[in-house]
Image (cartoon, coloured by chain):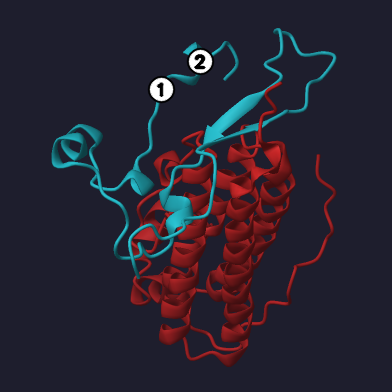
Amino acid sequence: MWIYEKKLQYPVKVSTCNPMLAKFLIEQYGGADGELAAALRYLNQRYSIPDKVIGLLTDIGTEEFAHLEMIATMVYKLTKDATPEQMKAAGLGAHYANHDNALFYNNAAGVPWTASYIQAKGDPIADLYEDIAAEEKARATYQWLIDMSDDPDLNDGLKFLREREVVHSQRFREAVEILKEEQGKKKFY
Amino acid sequence: MKAGVIVKEFTQRKYYHPYVSPFDPCPPIRVKSYDTPPQLYLGFQPPGLPQYQPKQALYSGTLWPALFSPYDNPYERGGQS
């Protein structure tokens, strides 16, 4: 079970009215390397991974949901007061036709989230390498988003999220090192 | 670097004892295992590693014993996976 704390992991402030940014940010909401995919990937893999790294996957998977909330807040703030005309001008006309101003788990191109974005091979090395790759891809996505945004307050939040990808990648790399150690070696008598 | 470079000793399969609940519905597998093949340990392959004879290399799928990773069904290898 989880205990919910009714605040964001890091404050989200959006100071420029620029609904088009929401169209790009949604990539990290419902895209292949987004926060939803990350959370579900880790919280599913953890069941069959060796006991020593279960806790890591649980903790990081949980944090990804905290990041998902931050992205949702950014998207919501950017679109909640947008008229249909403004949505259309921001490239979100198709989104408006389908969803009004509601958020939806799709990528920047409007493709709905799909379970094939996440993997669980069952082989601990393969799964952790998948996780490392996912973190690096998310880090790159945040970089491209920062490159396209000129809102310093929004970018502050995005830079925090990018840094967390760096830390998570490091922790997954450490998990690989733990699984490579010999201490679990089977004793033959 | 000359032939016979020391490559750190490692096993290609690791074993662990997963948590077993007293309420598990099926008989537990008390020891589980996973593969840790040689490419995890080699780093950038040093030059001059010992090589197989050509015919053996074709059978093995690699020219270098240091990269050879034999695999057999672990469930048929002495009962425990």
Classed neighbour count for the residue bearing mark 1: other residues with Cα under 10 Å, few (<14), some (14–19), many (≥20): few
B75 w.r.t. A102: above or below: above
Which residue does the numbered mark 1 point to in the structure image?
A: B72
Q: Position of residue A116 (x, y in %)?
A: 40, 41
Does dot 2 land on a helix, a strand or a loop? loop
- Tell me which amino acid carries mark 1: Asp
**What residue appears at the point 85 percent right and 14 percent down from the top-left corner?**
B22
Q: Colour of chain A?
A: red
Which residue does the numbered mark 2 point to in the structure image?
A: B77
Classed neighbour count for the residue bearing mark 2: other residues with Cα under 10 Å, few (<14), some (14–19), many (≥20): few
- Tell me which amino acid carries mark 2: Arg
Q: To which chain does the residue with label 2 belong?
A: B
Quarter where residue A172 is shown: bottom right
Task: Provide the letter of the chain coloured cyan.
Answer: B
Q: Are marks 2 and 1 in contact (CB under 8 Å)?
A: yes
**What residue appears at the point 57 percent right and 10 percent down from the top-left corner?**
B79
